[in-house]
Amino acid sequence: MNILLKHVLERLVRVGDLKVTGPKGTAHKFGDGSGEPVHIHIKTSHAERAITFDPMLAVPEAYMDGELDVLEGGILGLMRIAFQNMGSSGIDVSWSKAIEGLRHAFRRLQQINTAARSRRNVQRHYDLSGELYKLFLDEDMQYSCAYFEQPDMTLDEAQLAKKRHIAAKLRLKAGQTVLDIGSGWGGLGLYLAKIFDVDVQGVTLSTEQHGVATDRAHAQGLQDRVHFELKDYRHINERFDRIVSVGMFEHVGVNHYRTFFDKTATLLKPDGVMLLHTIGRSGVPWATSAFVRKYIFPGGYIPAMSEVMPAIEKSGLVVTDIEI
């Protein structure tokens, strides 16, 4: 193992029990020895160099490329150690921190999500086969966080609880019109129409999701109450009694928060209600993980509260409830 990588790992890994074997067979241990042991083998000098200068991106890439093996503890154990050390003082490795700082500085450039770029980003992630998502989602194909009212709930029960919770906050009345921005595979819109007798228009940028959602509406006999469109929210002109957006805001991009709330403000009727559900970061604004941005959510970003609230206030919308 090269001296620089040893220095990086000594600074990064303060908690846990991590053993690292380098390309030449030399092994070193890091952490305080607590918890289940994890042993990884960095198999190539290429991976060793990459991890030295950009561990947050290079470790998962090396694992995917077969240049890093987890010999003990499994990938979940390795991830546990990584998360345990994210808040430690050891994270301050000058060159690694500098790389992350540059990513933060340039995050606005990476999130210039025009309509065309937004569609490309969404299709790259969501236009994978629905069969893939069925492997780990609930029966209703809800892709956002579930709501576990009780710890022993199943995933299906918790996702139903989420939809009930959203509907309660929207205070729906029969005959109202609802806009679902980022309607996914259609589960929420179909639920609201069926249970609360409202008319729903859902919009998505995913061709795969649009097709599945439309088929589901016809299969449930709700095609006259629920319409799904392949459309960017910026191109909608009607007005609605209610707007709901669940798990879509992460794709908007910091540069476009004001645009998003200005637009939704014009789409709401004077006495309208909007509910926005998003993943949020508990700390200060920062950059999206390089691995997540490159391989999972291109153009995506998890916002801090301080980034969202000013855009809401400037749009003229009034915040009446925040749940974390």
Image: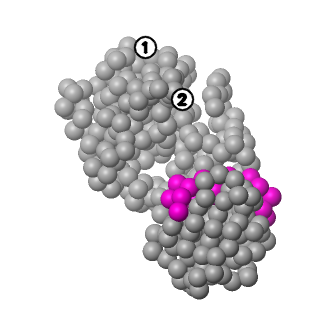
Percent of width and height locating residue 91: 75, 62
Q: Amino acid at mark 1?
A: Lys
Query: For the residue labelled by badge 2, is the local secondary structure a helix, a strand or a loop?
Result: strand
The residue tagged 2 is: 275
**In the rendering, which numbered label is found on residue 173?**
1
Percent of width and height locating residue 275: 54, 29
In percent of the image, x 47 and y 33: which residue is there? 146
In percent of the image, x 51 and y 27: which residue is there? 151
**Quadrant of the image occupied by residue 47:** bottom right
**Quadrant of the image occupied by residue 40:** bottom right
Q: Specify the quadrant that holds the N terminus.
A: bottom right
In percent of the image, x 28 and y 25: which residue is there? 225
Q: Nearer the viewer, residue 314 or 160?
A: 160
Stretch of the chain drawn in magenta: 72-92
Mark 1 is surrounded, within 10 Å at the Cα level, by few (under 14), some (14 to 19) or many (20 or more) other residues, namely few
Magenta stretch, main secondary structure, is helix
In percent of the image, x 53 and y 83: which residue is there? 44
Q: Amino acid at mark 2?
A: Leu
Q: Is residue 321 magenta?
A: no
